[in-house]
Image (spheres, helix red, strand yellow):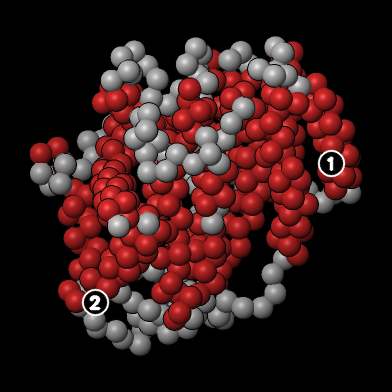
Amino acid sequence: MVFAFAAAVAGALIWIPHLIAPRRLTAVKAQPFECGKDPIEVAEGRFAIKFSTIAIFFILIDIELIFIWPWAVLYRRLGWFGFAEMLVFLGILMFGFLYIWRKGGLEWE
Amino acid sequence: MEHLALDALAAFILLNAVIGMVTYVTLLERKFAARMQSRIGPYRVGPHGLLQPIADALKLMMKEDIVPRAADRWVYNLAPIVFLIPCVLIFATIPFAPRLGLADLNIGVLFFLAVSSLEIVGLFMGGWGSNNKYALLSAMRAVNQIISYDLPFVFAALIPVVLAGSLQMSAIVAAQQGLWFVAYPVIGQLGFVAFLVATLAAENRVPFDILEAESELVAGFRVEYSGMKFAIIQLGEYAHMIASSFLGALLFLGGWLGPGSDIPAIGVLWFLLKAMLVFLVVTWVRWSFVRIRVDQILAVSWKLLLPATLGLLLVTAFWVALRGGAGA
């Protein structure tokens, strides 16, 4: 319900200016923004691989998170058993994390 | 049918409350920032500038809406809507007082974190659809930063979950009846600080605002947006920030608990007060610190916050187990 209302409000907010705002589009206004000169090139082409590697590390650890959520909720019932389990699990996870770290995967240069 | 109408009414009220709150929070931030710099801030429109947000909204509505020629029209026009929806949706799970919230889900915290990170989709759509090199670079940086800080953010938010043993917002508040989680020795304070830092980064606030670094990227992913679309993106950002302040108040500061909070009205007041406190800390940081570099941002997240919050989570777990968590 909130979703529908939020979508409606956002849509309305975009639609209202169509009624009251001026529309005087010129060729210069429609250019991609550039600091006071003609645009040199449009935004496409290659991007640094660093962005992708960070994304991969994120996915690696984010998947482990799915396991930690239910653990956190049920932790009181699991007690020491849950603690030991998580220690083993995070130990393995952190081993991989340290490997990434030592290999220089977290450096940005 | 009646149930549906009630739901609709509640959603309508909530949405209006959120939008009203957001417009006035911008005024609060401007006033606060002005005072920090020995200025007065908005003063001319209405008494003490109280009508300033309304004037701003009207002005933005009157502005021409420019779609650049190079832009991918569909993606470009949809981006503000996709950006705003999750930012408003997260308010649905926040209880403002006992039983005074839209939906007190039993997976409240999970819902909040999951939906609030959907915002990045709208952000990237905006950066990509603008087809402007500044906007695209900004969007790439934003994704990079938000996913990096998502992990410490979740780990920090899990500390209260472990302490309370529930993902339900109201249950987490109820567990703080005796002592607020922020007052728990060491784990509470460190957890709260980690949560605040991760919140700042997830909202792209100073000192983590490299995605809009105005000296290099002009205005970041929203450089091509004008008029109301720009306003919607702004609205979404502030809504997200307020929601995070509410979450901080719920998870660590005891939500609506406080002297006299048996009466719902006073409870709401306490809750708003705490959330505003968190918000003012965020604003205070914004006007006191300088922007840090990309590599420093990543180092803070991956090399400091991630191991630190994980360790803190384990310490919390150890402590709970020590207190005889089994069966409790």
Residue B22 relative to residue A97: left or right: left
Name the spot of residue B125 as percent of width and height, x first: 52, 69
Q: Amino acid at mark 2?
A: His
Q: Quadrant of the C terminus of chain B?
A: top right
Q: What residue is rendered at 85% in x and 48% in y? A: A100
What element does badge 1 sit on? helix
Determine which quarter of the picture holds residue B314. Answer: top right
B136 versus B292 height, above or below: below
Residue B228 relative to residue A99: left or right: left
Circle 2: is it few (<14), some (14-19), or many (20+) Cα within 10 Å?
some
Camera-side residue: B284 or B230?
B230
Q: What residue is rendered at 49% in x and 64% in y? A: B122
Determine which quarter of the picture holds residue B43. Answer: top left
Circle 1: is it few (<14), some (14-19), or many (20+) Cα within 10 Å?
some
Marker disc for residue A18? 2
Q: Amino acid at mark 1?
A: Leu
B174 versus B48 height, above or below: above
Q: Which residue position holds label 1?
A: A93
Q: Which residue of the protein is positioned furthest toward the bottom in this rendering?
A: A27
Residue B277 relative to residue B159: left or right: left
A20 versus B291 height, above or below: below
Q: What residue is rendered at 23% in x and 71% in y? A: A16
What element does badge 2 sit on? helix
Camera-side residue: B7 or A29?
B7
Q: Write down the chain letter for disc 1.
A: A
Residue B76 relative to residue B229: left or right: right
Name the spot of residue A55 as percent of width and height, x first: 71, 57
Mark yes or no: residue B8 visible: no
Q: Write down the chain letter for disc 2.
A: A
Camera-side residue: B208 or B111?
B111
